[in-house]
Image (cartoon, coloured by chain):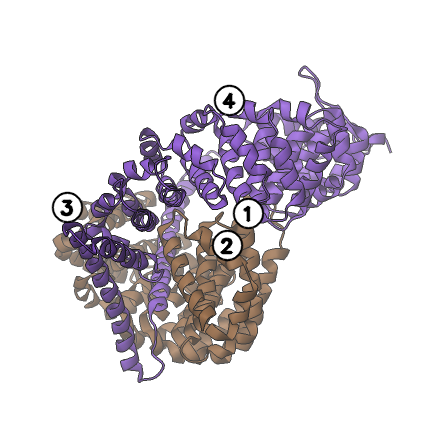
């Protein structure tokens, strides 16, 4: 295996390959090898590979730029190298040996941040993905990079033109929330105000908006009671998105898929907010409970067991509503037969996760009704 | 009229460069896309795990944050461990009760069974796996022995019912119990015991085709059929539910065998005639699977009073749980056998009016399943005789269908489109274009359906796009005073059709290009 890796690195580095397709294929093959390898058996080899990748990434900054072709070549190479780094980080992020990789965290962040000085949005996207993987692998210690990194993160979130970068940046916000937990608080004002602007911007490609809603759920879950100040701004956005779900025409499969994606992300946002407030300020959500319940009822009535990810998110959200607000909304559940029919069917689903979630929800609702 | 200038001839280097660029872009974009998708998938997975983990944490009323967390975790773990220990203990009690003799043994058995049943019935912590690993199933099989008291049999069957409601592997663990569960369906056992056994068997059958085959091989079909005849409502309901699970396929063998059992059709009819809507619901599901899987079943059912009874339910009931299988069963029958439209739903009879009223009620419903399946059933009726088309056209269905075709979800829109399309044509026997019913076409177009059909033309689904194109052909050919092409143009129909100029599907390409050439060729506009 070591020989294959060496051969691939040599292939990617061949000076006779003006054919950049060869270079790209070599690095992509490396990615697949990393994905398939067993860390315990190949730890040293992968550490060496990472060191080599970082060395090459560093070398890209010394390329003499004399033409737009040179610029493009530099960007392409940086993108490919960031890609390999990302795959290695993802591989290590949930195992015990990750300290071997995190030894290089400082060096990686310096290099990734330098990549952002390039103009090409393609390489920004790759660097952003790599930083997200690094944040998750690093955990709370990632906070030391935040003062420098959050500037680029907000730039990414504001990048309407290259909406793929914007979308990836939104995903990275979620990674950072998971990694830092409450340490992310100092940066939330900037992130939230940017996300809310993104949501209301007609310039931003619509495919980015569902991930933003889910991301707001991640932020709310992380911030807990501190999310209170954003409630007056967030809830109108969510209600507007909910109305859009029913107002929009759905002439083709793409539109149906977008509608489903939007419904699911609204559910995820509400779930994050409800769970975030559950032990502290759940009463803040009581005024919105009726609207939320009506929305989930309408969506699931129309989608019942036809789209599993939407159903799963909706069922979970019903449980979160009962779990967080409890006796305050007992009347909603008493007045509605819908949820018992829904849960009865979900408990018979072939999907194990859906059955598990539905059973949990039944238990929560039962406790609410007898309280 | 387009300019007919020739494009400049390309330089010799251009094709090669274009080819290379495309390849490079393709490799990079594909790879980046794959990484992005993987990052997104990982993110979703983490989010779900986090949400789920938080959901099981129950915070005590008071205490510091740290103590709260610890205590919450401990309470959950402790509670689960405690219940698991109780379950293992209950199974041990089952075992010991079998090995003692003398006075009080029966009471001890019942108490042991009841303890286990209560544990298996609580919803918060799944205990089925614990019970199975402790050896519950073989013991319960012994408790099902013939000659045991009804109370004992009932409790044992109840435990097995809840075990069968667990995970797939847990359901499969019931295999040793199946012969006795099936045996108790018969006349030797009381109705109460038989019903509980039917419930357990229904849960097993619901798990999958493999277990259904096992149940059928062990002879579950006939005693379950007999149980469906029961005069006790809950027993008949449970048996019908279990039966619908048992015959649901995909192998049609069970459905074909069921329809040959003497008296089964009469049992279905008798159940549908009763007031009990829950019973009718379960029996309707049996009809759904018979009509979906058994040709012989279809032939017998359409010539019985089942269609009239289903139509009566469709017409009079507002119960969604009942309407869904009733509608689907009728839809299956209408689609499968011309006898339904030609001889049962004869124009001029009361039954067709009731059927139409019921279908229109479903079309107007806010339930997606009802909307879609009623559209589907109507499209098959609308494919019938000219009298059927006139009847549907004159009814409330037409404006509802026009709304559906222009504003609803893709799959419902398509069914509505089939119905509206069928209302506008009388098929000829040969390969000629169908004859147009001008009155219907004009009303449907003037009613606002045309934009909906043009949306269909833009669909990525070839069959759906073809349906849209066929309707545009009708409009352009048949709308009076040659106004059809203009109407299509006003709704951007030309652009929709021109998308097929280089389509990979030759038939679609030829159809679309042919229509554009014929109706928007060099003569277009000269009439004015």
Crowding at mark 3 (Cα within 10 Å: few <14, some 14-19, many 20+): few
Which chain is disc 2 placed on?
Answer: A
Residue closest to the far front: B103
Mark 2: which secondary structure? Answer: helix
**Colour of chain B in the rendered structure image:** purple
Residue matched to label 4: B296
Which chain is disc 3 placed on?
Answer: A
Residue matched to label 1: B321
**Same chain check for tags 4 and 1:** yes
Question: Splitting the image into 4 quarters, where does residue B316 fall?
Answer: top right
Crowding at mark 1 (Cα within 10 Å: few <14, some 14-19, many 20+): some
Query: Is mark 4 in CB contact (under 8 Å) with mark 3?
Result: no
Residue matched to label 3: A1
Which chain is disc 1 placed on?
Answer: B
Q: Is residue B52 left or right of residue B410?
A: left
Label count reads 4
**Colour of chain A in the rendered structure image:** brown
Query: Is mark 1 in CB contact (under 8 Å) with mark 3?
Result: no
Going from the N terminus, do you reach mark 3 or mark 2 first? Answer: 3
Residue matched to label 2: A341
Query: Is mark 2 in CB contact (under 8 Å) with mark 1?
Result: yes
Measure how far apart labels 1 and 3 are at the Cα level.
60 Å
């Amino acid at each position: 295996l070591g020989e294959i890796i060496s051969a691939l690195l040599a292939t990617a580095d061949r000076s006779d390959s003006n054919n950049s397709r060869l270079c790209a294929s070599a690095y992509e093959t490396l990615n697949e090898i990393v994905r398939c390898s067993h860390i315990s058996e190949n730890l040293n080899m992968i550490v060496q590979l990472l060191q080599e990748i970082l060395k090459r990434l560093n070398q890209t900054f010394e390329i003499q730029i004399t033409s737009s072709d040179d610029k493009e070549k530099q960007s392409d190479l940086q993108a490919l190298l960031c890609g390999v780094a990302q795959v290695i980080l993802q591989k290590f992020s949930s195992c015990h040996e990750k300290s071997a990789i995190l030894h290089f965290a400082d060096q990686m962040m310096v290099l990734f941040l330098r990549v952002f000085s390039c103009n090409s949005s393609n390489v920004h996207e790759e660097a952003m993905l790599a930083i997200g993987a690094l944040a998750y692998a690093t955990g709370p210690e990632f906070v030391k990079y935040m003062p420098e990194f959050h500037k680029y993160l907000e730039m990414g979130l504001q990048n309407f033109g290259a909406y793929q970068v914007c979308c990836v940046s939104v995903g990275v916000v979620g990674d950072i929330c998971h990694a830092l937990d409450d340490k992310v608080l100092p940066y939330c004002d900037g992130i939230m105000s940017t996300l809310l602007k993104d949501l209301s911007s007609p310039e931003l490609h619509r495919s980015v908006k569902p991930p933003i809603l889910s991301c707001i759920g991640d932020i709310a879950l992380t911030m807990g009671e501190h999310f209170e100040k954003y409630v007056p701004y967030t809830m109108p956005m969510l209600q507007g998105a909910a109305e859009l779900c029913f107002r929009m025409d759905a002439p083709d499969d793409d539109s149906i898929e977008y509608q489903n994606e939007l419904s699911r992300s609204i559910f995820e946002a509400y779930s994050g907010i409800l769970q975030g407030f559950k032990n502290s300020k759940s009463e803040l959500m009581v005024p919105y409970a009726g609207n939320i319940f009506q929305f989930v009822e309408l969506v699931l009535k129309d989608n019942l067991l036809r789209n599993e990810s939407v159903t799963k998110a909706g069922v979970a959200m019903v449980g979160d509503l009962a779990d967080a607000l409890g006796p305050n909304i007992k009347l909603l559940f008493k007045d509605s037969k819908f949820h018992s029919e829904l849960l009865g069917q979900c408990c018979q689903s072939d999907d194990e996760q859906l059955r598990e979630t539905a059973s949990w929800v039944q238990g929560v609702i039962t406790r609410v009704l007898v309280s | 009229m387009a300019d007919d200038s020739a494009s400049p001839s390309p330089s010799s280097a251009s094709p090669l460069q274009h080819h290379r660029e495309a390849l490079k872009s393709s490799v990079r974009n594909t790879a980046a896309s794959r990484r992005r998708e993987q990052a997104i998938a990982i993110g979703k997975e983490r989010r779900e795990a986090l949400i789920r983990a938080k959901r099981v944490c129950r915070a005590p009323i008071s205490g510091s944050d740290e103590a709260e967390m610890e205590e919450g975790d401990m309470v959950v773990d402790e509670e689960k461990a405690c219940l698991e220990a109780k379950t293992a203990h209950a199974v041990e009690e089952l075992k010991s009760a079998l090995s003692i003799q003398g006075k009080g043994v029966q009471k001890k058995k019942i108490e042991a069974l009841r303890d286990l049943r209560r544990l298996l019935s609580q919803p918060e912590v799944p205990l089925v796996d614990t019970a199975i690993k402790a050896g519950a199933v073989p013991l319960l099989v012994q408790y099902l022995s013939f000659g045991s008291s009804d109370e004992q049999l009932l409790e044992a069957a109840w435990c097995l019912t809840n075990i069968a409601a667990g995970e797939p592997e847990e359901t499969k663990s019931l295999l040793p119990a199946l012969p006795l569960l099936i045996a108790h369906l018969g006349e030797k056992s009381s109705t109460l015991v038989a019903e509980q056994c039917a419930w357990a068997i229904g849960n097993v059958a619901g798990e999958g085709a493999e277990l259904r085959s096992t149940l059928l091989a062990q002879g579950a079909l006939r005693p379950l059929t007999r149980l469906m005849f029961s005069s006790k409502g809950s027993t008949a309901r449970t048996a019908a539910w279990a039966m619908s699970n048992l015959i649901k396929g995909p192998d049609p063998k069970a459905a074909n065998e069921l329809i040959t059992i003497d008296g089964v059709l009469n049992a279905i009819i008798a159940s549908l005639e009763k007031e009990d809507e829950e019973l009718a619901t379960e029996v309707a599901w049996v009809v759904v699977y018979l009509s979906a899987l058994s040709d012989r079943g279809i032939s017998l059912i359409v010539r019985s009073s089942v269609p009239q009874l289903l139509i009566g339910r469709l017409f009079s009931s507002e119960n969604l749980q009942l309407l869904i299988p009733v509608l689907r069963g009728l839809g299956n029958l209408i689609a499968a056998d011309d006898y339904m439209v030609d001889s049962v739903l004869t124009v001029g009879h009361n039954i067709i009016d009731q059927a139409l009223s019921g279908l229109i009620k479903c079309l107007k419903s806010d339930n997606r399943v009802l909307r879609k399946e009623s559209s589907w059933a109507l499209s098959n009726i609308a494919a019938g005789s000219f009298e059927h088309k006139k009847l549907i056209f004159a009814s409330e269905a037409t404006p509802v269908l026009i709304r559906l075709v222009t504003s609803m979800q893709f799959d419902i829109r398509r069914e509505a489109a089939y119905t509206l399309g069928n209302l506008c044509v009388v098929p000829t026997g040969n390969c000629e274009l169908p004859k147009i019913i001008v009155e219907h076409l004009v009303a449907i177009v003037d009613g606002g359906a045309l934009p909906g059909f043009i949306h269909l033309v833009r669909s990525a689904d070839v069959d759906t796009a073809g349906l849209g194109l066929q309707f545009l052909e009708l409009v352009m050919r048949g709308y009076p005073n040659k106004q059809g092409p203009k109407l299509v143009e006003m709704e951007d129909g030309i652009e929709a059709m021109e998308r097929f100029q280089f389509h990979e599907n030759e038939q679609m390409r030829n159809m679309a290009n042919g229509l554009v050439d014929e109706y928007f060729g060099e003569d277009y506009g000269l009439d004015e």
